[in-house]
Image: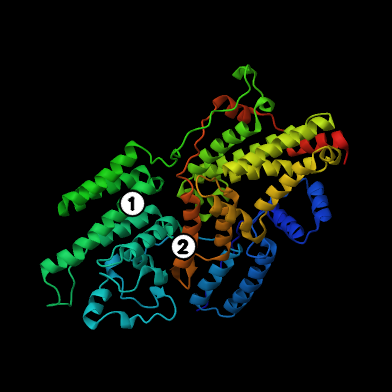
């Protein structure tokens, strides 16, 4: 019996603005600067460099991906069996031609009822001789799911039961275990909800007595070498989950976890119950503090003497001090971003303010800074005053690089690169060449070519504290989402999970180091309240100053 594909519609994967940015990147990549300039002016859209994919632009990469997927869709469409229809639906959803359903897993059954390892429920790296890794006696325990001789790093894909089962083995290398747990904590949202993951962990904790292995294990040996180690690892995993990813838990899920800790775990082990109780209590009482003060002396703020805070303007603040305050403001936003905000491109959704509030807040600050810069340069009536404003913000950009505030640096450069500023030829002629050269050097540093290779090298070389350019990581995550499916031949794609985990891990690794600087509230308020012009107003002001 043939299966029919329902007539459904889906939201396009890219907005018109995103496609326009991809086209502008292609023009930039091919050095078509005049065409790029005309396109920006005609569309009134400012080019914000987006991430390349290797040595290809996003447009080229997406066209190549589209050609490959088109071949796969054609092959799948020739077969009308239920399995082929399911595969076709998945391919169509991946390219936005059908709604992409969440890969939420509920129907796998109890984790201990899962069949022994097979290609249908778990897949390992090619070339791995699984059979040679355990004796026949050990294989019985492996088949029952108590442990596996295969390291978690060798897993390519699996069912949710298999992936969660590997979180808590009776015998596993501690380093391998820690790495694998981190991958799951950062990527499980690809496949299931926090409630479903907790269900599976509770199932894993309830270790059954093995059947069909009479004489292989004594009860006390089983409890000491298998049951207790697995239960301890389940509790350790949940404790780390609560401690470092507390935003995953809503009130109902937290209450359920607390009740389970007191009843089920409490009957087995008071120390384990106390461990869970303590982890929950600490996070409920006090959020995890991420930003740490860097050891060393804080430099005294550089403010003009004799000017009260109420009379202070941005122009009065030395470039070095303005850069310091911008660095603090930007890093505060960066450090507040939660892992949950980075899943499934939440910041691009219509309800992004709810799903990714801190990402949205940091993007808003970036845009505000860029607008403040553009407005400050374009607004003065005299060209010499505009040139001074340009030099001032160029100095701020230089100081931001010295402070390693690379997101702040990108924001200021975005303001200086605005088309309304770019058109001020008479103004730029009055800017010293050394200043223009320094801006060009900073633009080369932040250029997205080669997947931001220069910026990544800078981050690696300077060390913490550093505030990376957030857009770089968001582009990484977006492309990973575009180029990799959640499922791999029906199994949860752990390879994609590792890619997502690595990106999130790199972003998070810089959140815990603060700048050894003193905040000046008056200056930060000046930045927040600084007047800004809209793109239309900037364009009109620029044309009024020097024409088109």
Residue in view at x 27 percent, y 74 percent: 142
Which numbered dot is residue 287? Answer: none
Query: SS at mark 1?
Result: helix
Q: Nearer the viewer, residue 381 or 337?
A: 381
Q: Circle 2 sits on which residue?
A: 497
Name the one closer to the observer, 193 or 271. 271
Front position in the image: 231 or 1: 231
Percent x, y for residue 337? 49, 44
- Within 10 Å of disc 2 (Cα), the crowding (few <14, some 14-19, many 20+) is many
**Residue occupying the point 34% across, 62% down:** 175
Left or right: 39, with 396 as reference point:
right
- The quarter of the image holding the C terminus is top right
Q: Quadrant of residue 369?
A: top right
Q: Is residue 76 left or right of residue 178?
A: right
Residue 240 — which label?
A: 1
Quadrant for residue 157, please give it. Answer: bottom left
Q: Position of residue 144 (x, y in %)?
A: 25, 73
Point 81% across, 34% down: residue: 541
Color encoding of the figure: rainbow
- Asked whether residue 285 appears in the rendered view, the answer is yes
From the top left corner, tell me how far across and down residue 72 is, in percent.
Answer: 59, 75
Q: Residue at coordinates 27% horizontally, 71% vertically from top-left?
A: 145
Circle 1: is it few (<14), some (14-19), or many (20+) Cα within 10 Å?
some
* Image coords of residue 350 (percent x, y): 58, 47
Mark 1–mark 2 CB contact (< 8 Å): no
Can you tell which of label 1 and label 2 is closer to the viewer? 1
Q: Is residue 510 left or right of residue 216?
A: right
The answer, for residue 12, to whether it is visible in the render is no
Q: Secondary structure at mark 2?
A: helix
Give the spatial CA distance, label 1 vs label 2. 19 Å
């Amino acid at each position: 019996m043939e299966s029919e594909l329902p007539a459904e519609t889906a939201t396009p994967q890219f907005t018109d603005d995103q496609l326009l940015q991809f086209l502008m990147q292609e023009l930039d990549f091919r050095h078509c600067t005049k065409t790029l300039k005309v396109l920006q002016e005609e569309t009134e859209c400012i080019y914000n460099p987006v991430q390349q994919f290797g040595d290809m632009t996003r447009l080229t990469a997406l066209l190549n991906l589209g050609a490959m997927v088109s071949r796969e869709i054609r092959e799948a469409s020739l077969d009308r069996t239920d399995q082929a229809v399911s595969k076709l639906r998945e391919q169509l959803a991946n390219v936005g031609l059908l709604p992409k359903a969440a890969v939420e897993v509920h129907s796998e059954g109890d984790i201990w009822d899962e069949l022994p390892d097979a290609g249908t429920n778990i897949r390992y790296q090619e070339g791995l001789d699984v059979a040679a890794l355990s004796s026949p006696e050990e294989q019985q325990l492996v088949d029952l799911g108590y442990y596996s001789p295969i390291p978690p790093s060798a897993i390519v894909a699996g069912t949710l039961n298999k992936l969660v089962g590997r979180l808590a083995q009776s015998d596993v290398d501690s380093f391998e275990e820690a790495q694998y747990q981190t991958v799951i904590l950062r990527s499980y949202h690809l496949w299931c909800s926090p409630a479903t993951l907790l269900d599976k962990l509770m199932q894993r904790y309830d270790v059954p007595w093995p059947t069909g292995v009479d004489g292989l294990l004594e009860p006390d040996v089983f409890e000491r070498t298998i049951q207790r180690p697995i239960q301890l690892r389940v509790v350790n995993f949940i404790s780390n989950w609560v401690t470092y990813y507390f935003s995953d838990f809503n009130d109902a899920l937290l209450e359920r976890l607390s009740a389970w800790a007191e009843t089920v775990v409490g009957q087995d082990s008071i120390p384990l119950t106390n461990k869970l109780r303590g982890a929950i209590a600490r996070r409920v009482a006090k959020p995890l503090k991420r930003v740490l003060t860097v050891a060393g002396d804080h430099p005294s703020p550089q403010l003009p003497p004799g000017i009260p805070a109420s009379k202070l303007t941005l122009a009065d603040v030395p470039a070095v001090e303005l850069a310091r305050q911008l660095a603090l403001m930007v890093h505060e936003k960066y450090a507040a971003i939660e892992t949950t905000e980075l899943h499934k491109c939440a910041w691009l959704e219509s309800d992004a303010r709810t799903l990714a509030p801190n990402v949205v807040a940091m993007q808003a600050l970036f845009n505000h800074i860029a607008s403040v810069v553009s407005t400050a340069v374009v607004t003065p009536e005299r060209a010499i005053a505009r040139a001074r404003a340009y030099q001032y913000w160029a100095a701020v950009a230089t100081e931001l690089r010295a402070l390693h505030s690379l997101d702040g640096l990108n924001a200021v450069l975005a303001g200086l690169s605005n088309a309304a500023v770019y058109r001020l030829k008479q103004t730029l002629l009055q800017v010293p060449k050394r200043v223009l050269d320094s801006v060009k050097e900073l633009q080369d540093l932040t250029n997205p070519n080669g997947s931001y290779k220069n910026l990544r090298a800078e981050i690696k070389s300077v060390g913490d504290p550093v505030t990376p350019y957030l857009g770089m990581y968001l582009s990484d995550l977006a492309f990973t989402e575009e180029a990799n499916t959640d499922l791999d031949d029906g199994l949860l794609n752990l390879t994609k999970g590792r890619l997502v985990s690595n990106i999130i891990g790199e972003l998070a690794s810089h959140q815990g180091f603060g700048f050894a600087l003193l905040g000046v509230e008056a200056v930060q308020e000046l930045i927040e309240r600084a007047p800004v012009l809209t793109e239309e107003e900037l364009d009109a002001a620029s044309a009024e100053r020097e024409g088109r």
